[in-house]
Image (cartoon, helix red, strand yellow):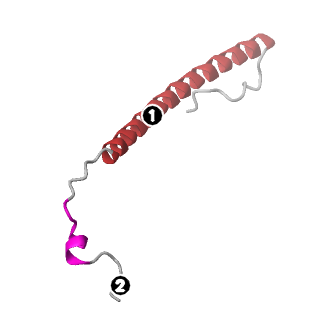
Amino acid sequence: MNPIPTAAPASTSAAELVTFARVRCIEWKKAGAMTSSILEGSLAGAQDTLAQLDAGRARQSAAVDLAIPTFRDIAGRGGASPG
């Protein structure tokens, strides 16, 4: 069942139509508030994820070079073709 009425009943008085319009407006405001809070939660989650990714990138760029040769350096597989 749709919580937000979309059409007034066929046989209604003017007062009933006004009441119907007010209820519909209130329901739309409630739905808008719910949607807004959901979007705010999604935004907060996305910002948290981005902050974690930025922190990971900062840790990687702060790595210390220990001057230990890699396997490629030791095995002579640096990618250059023998010539």
Residue 24: x %, y % from top left: 67, 21
Residue 26: x %, y % from top left: 63, 16
The amino acid beneath tag 2 is Ser
Q: Which residue is mark 1?
A: 47
- Reply above or below: 15 against 8: above
Which quadrant would residue 35 be assigned to in this image? top right
SS class of the residue under badge 2? loop
Q: CA distance from mark 2 to mark 1?
A: 46 Å
Q: Which residue is mark 2?
A: 81
Considering every residue shown, the one lying at the far top of the view is: 15
Q: Is residue 52 left or right of residue 76?
A: right
SS class of the residue under badge 1? helix
- On residue 67, the disc is none
Q: Residues within 10 Å of mark 1 (few under 14, many from 20)?
A: few
Q: Quadrant of the N terminus?
A: top right
- Reply above or below: 25 against 81: above
Residue 28: x %, y % from top left: 63, 23
Residue numbers of the magenta segment? 68-76
**Residue 65: in magenta span:** no
Which residue occupies the foreground of this view, 32 or 46? 46
Which residue occupies the foreground of this view, 28 or 81? 81
- Name the residue rendered at 25%, 72% in the picture: 72
